[in-house]
Amino acid sequence: MVQLSNLLLGTFALASGTPLTRNDLKACLEDAISGDADRAQFPAEKSFITNDVKYFNLNLKHQPAAVMYPENQEQVAEVVKCAAKYDKKVQARAGGRDFINKCLGGADDAVVVDLKDLNALEVNQRSWMATVGPGNKLRNLIEGLNKNGKRFLPHGVSPTVGVGGHLMVGGLGLATRQHGLSIDLLEQIEVVLANDTIAIASEKRNSDLFFAPPYVELAQLELKTLPEPKEIVLFQYNFTSENPTDISEALKAYHQVMRDANLPRNLGASSSLTRRTFFINGGFFGSDVEYKTLNLEGRLPKMTAKRVVPRTSYIDFFNDIMQSASSFPDAANMYNKDTVVTPGTMPANSTIDAFVDHITTADDGEAGWSFVFDLYGGASNDVAKGGKAFPHRDLIYTLSAATTSDGQTSKAAEESIDTAFLKLQGNRPDRYLSYVGVPNYKLKNAQAMYWGSNLARLRKIKSQYDPSDLFSTPQNVKP
Ligand SMILES: *[C@@H]1O[C@H](CO)[C@@H](O)[C@H](O)[C@H]1NC(C)=O
Ligand SMILES: *[C@@H]1O[C@H](CO)[C@@H](O)[C@H](O)[C@H]1NC(C)=O
Ligand SMILES: *[C@@H]1O[C@H](CO)[C@@H](O)[C@H](O)[C@H]1NC(C)=O
């Protein structure tokens, strides 16, 4: 589509003798940011790739037509207008921590709108509503809410994730079982539409738009905040062994914990599995005494190491958790995949054995890999499936995998991961959906996998607000 229209423009230019070249897009974009040269970067500039494009996944090197750094929503709207005029796709980038580089459009020649300077962060001291620019990173959000009245809200644990992108995919995190997803606390958004209009949306106003923020450029968010938890028990339990049977036993025992319908909501945990270690990292948002009554340690036999720190403050807890999360590289050749597990699709013990047998013995193409089991449920399942675009309101956990390698990720490494998922799914992938926050570039039928029963409504809203698919990536909902 893009190529065809470029061709047509080219023909027109030849016929009329007025060359309609890239310079016109460039001039338009430069005007859009009031001639402030630093806010408009183009491929001809020497440091374009290292300073502006900044690939997160080095396997997928799409080259944008421009990377723009607008300073307010009006400039975002002007940039959108130029891109539409010159038939370029537009993609917003908040933190850029995106496994398939869809923040660069997921294809060549997009106009990337980097939102780093839309970074307002204020907390109203009476209503406790936070006004948050989408360009804030999670670390800024945590620290800003803490400084402005010891407030917090549920969200993920990677400090460099941008708030805008995080909200677009839902916003899952360690406090999700108790308080829901970030979007469950979202009250209002200010957005730039494909026709370069700035609009405000909430449950009451433009409610379709509020339901489907993936079709817009986010400019500002209004979020409810909560008082910080007073004390948290930080816990880490490790199971390290050369023997895959021990790893499998630990994973089966942990599945018994995760499937427990009486598990308290103030428990949040993420666990990581590598060849010789399974470890659980988490927080209990309450007192040491209450934590002990859970008897987690009794239910998770044969641990090889543990660290339990009661009475941790919220900010210390998050700093600790973010430190382990930030061990993930800033850029790498990577391959990622994800699946969503519900009470109806929890793997049987024999399935877990087959999964562990595969990951500990298969040829992994020499790539470094890990699987992460993130425990959810609780409050995130209180919202109806059709209440927000995020469709997974019957979660027990999400399983995601990451491999990183030196140089292009090999076919063997990708296939080993793909097979591991099939094993855990008992060879029934048709029973499982995926979480859009861990996208996989090969995923078939991606829109249905990510949005489940909400896809039809999302498609309808997309057709209304962005009929020409201006805000486009290979896997977004199409009009
Ligand atoms: C699965 O394994 C766990 C841990 O060994 C055990 O407690 C549980 O009873 C097993 N479930 C079944 C159905 O055998
Ligand atoms: C558990 O294992 C992880 C990963 O190897 C390590 O970073 C952490 O320090 C270990 N924790 C304990 C308590 O040994
Ligand atoms: C832009 O699109 C919105 C949503 O479809 C519509 O309500 C609005 O009237 C449009 N604005 C203009 C100037 O066309």
Image (cartoon, rainbow, N blue to C red):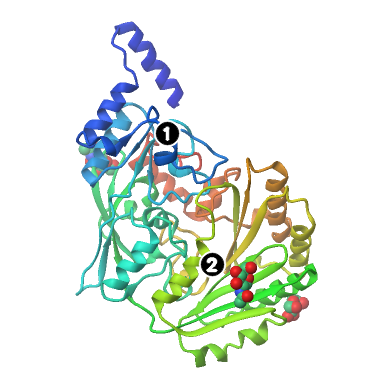
Q: Confirm or reject: label 2 Cβ below 8 Å from ligand 1.
A: no
Please tell me whether mark 1 sits on a helix, a strand or a loop.
loop
Q: Earlier in the sequence, mark 1 or mark 2?
A: 1
| Residue 476 seen in the figure | no
**Which residue shows up at 36% across the image and 67% down it?**
142
Q: Residue 183, image x and y in percent?
A: 38, 62
Between 136 and 155, the one nearer to me in the picture: 136
**Which residue shows up at 40% across the image and 35% down it?**
48
Q: Residue 15, image x and y in percent?
A: 33, 6
Whether tag 1 and tag 2 are in contact, CB under 8 A, the answer is no
Q: Amino acid at mark 2?
A: Asp
Using the rendered view, name the quadrant where residue 222 is placed.
Answer: bottom left
**Which residue shows up at 67% across the image and 77% down it?**
256
Q: Few, some or many C-alpha atoms within 10 Å of disc 1 (few <14, some 14-19, many ≥20)? A: many
The reply, left or right, for residue 260 in relation to residue 426 is: left
| Residue 323 seen in the figure | yes
Residue under numbered circle 1: 64
Tell me how far mark 1 sits from mark 2, CA to CA: 38 Å
Residue under numbered circle 2: 394
Picture disc at residue 326: none
Q: Few, some or many C-alpha atoms within 10 Å of disc 2 (few <14, some 14-19, many ≥20)? A: many
- Quarter of the image where the N terminus is located: top left
Please tell me whether mark 2 sits on a helix, a strand or a loop.
loop
Quadrant where ligand 2 appears: bottom right
Q: Confirm or reject: label 1 Cβ below 8 Å from ligand 3.
A: no
Q: Is residue 440 above or below residue 300?
A: above
Q: Residue 282, image x and y in percent?
A: 53, 75
The reply, left or right, for residue 29 in relation to residue 369 is: left
Q: Amino acid at mark 1?
A: Pro
**Which residue shows up at 50% across the image and 74% down it?**
378
- Quarter of the image where the C terminus is located: top left
Q: Is residue 112 above or below residue 181?
A: above
